Image: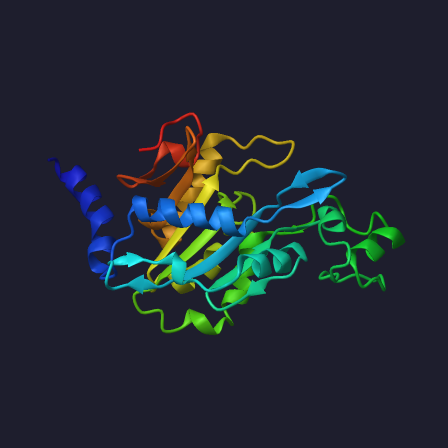
Amino acid sequence: MGLLSWMVLSLTVLPLAANKFPPVNEAQLQDIVLRILNGYRPTYEVEGQSKSPMFSLVVRIPFNGKTTKYDISQVSDAASTVKKTILDCEVYTGTNIVAATVLRWPDVVSQCPNGRVQWRTRSQARTWLEAYRQNPELFTDGTADHAEYRILQKLQSWPNIHNMGQDLLLFYVYASPCTTRCTNSDNRYNILSLLTSYVKFNMVFVFSKVHQPRNANIPEENLREGLMSLGGKIGLQRIFRCDKVNGRMKCANCNDNGNVAGWCYDDNKPPA
């Protein structure tokens, strides 16, 4: 093995060797993510059509010493309560879960018409529907607070974030973080600085879909660089993609010898 290859391997392994937490493997994550999607993914109907807004959650998963696995069945938060709260455009904060959907204009008018207006405005409207009726152009299309940013703001004051022990702190977001805001350190609404507070815990970051916004196409290089920026803050070995491949859930680590694994930013590349 050459000196350079040995250095790369050492840099990849050392953070894990220094971490004394029980390992998180892809098989465990496959079951956990399936349960998250089956239980907590929010949907609502608009004119007979089903909509599923972008959502994110943080779940504290207890470690079961007898099975030596992280046991999501011990998470007590009722899926129905979580989904109702986040579909009402509020951030759910419970015993083991903090969750939210994206808060996007004008989607909020159909998702949570009676939900409270959470942005500063000169309008006296108290609900999103009132705001729309008073001034349909009150906000520009695409004005949004992203789901992962919303939960990270709440997480700072979440009592259960302390005394984690061996429990797993799993950050899940349906699509990989956007490159213009979430993983852009120059954007005031990025998630990078917020996430660094949790690297001391047994933490992983998981997503399912490769982020592509509406009516746009992000170059693969930008998507790769976004994940590299995220990895630079929390460790690339903590980032996983979990999605269905040929009808079965597949999880793969996004760390490929210090680079971003291809499947984590390109659907056409096979999972490792």
> Picture coordinates of residue 229 (x, y %)?
42, 47
Question: Based on the displayed image, in which of its 4 quarters is residue 1 positioned?
Answer: top left
Front-most of 32 and 170? 32
> Picture coordinates of residue 144 (x, y %)?
66, 50
Question: Based on the displayed image, in which of its 4 quarters is residue 4 positioned?
Answer: top left
Q: Residue furthest right?
A: 134
Describe the colour scheme in one phrase. rainbow
**Quarter in which the C terminus is drawn:** top left
Q: Residue at x 51, y 45 (%)?
A: 174
Asked if residue 105 shows in the view, the reply is: no
Q: Residue at x 67, y 39 (%)?
A: 50
Tell me if 239 is positioned left or right of 5 in this view. Answer: right
> Picture coordinates of residue 2 (x, y %)?
12, 35
Tell me if 165 is positioned left or right of 219 in this view. Answer: left
Q: Residue at x 53, y 44 (%)?
A: 178
Tell me if 74 is positioned left or right of 165 in this view. Answer: right
Query: Does 166 sit above or below residue 217?
Result: below
Front-most of 160 and 40? 40
Circle count: 0
Q: Residue furthest top?
A: 268
Q: Residue furthest left?
A: 1
Question: Based on the displayed image, in which of its 4 quarters is residue 129 positioned?
Answer: bottom right
Asked if residue 97 shows in the view, the reply is: yes
Query: Does 127 sit above or below residue 107?
Result: below
> Picture coordinates of residue 79 (x, y %)?
54, 57
Q: Residue at x 45, y 45 (%)?
A: 207
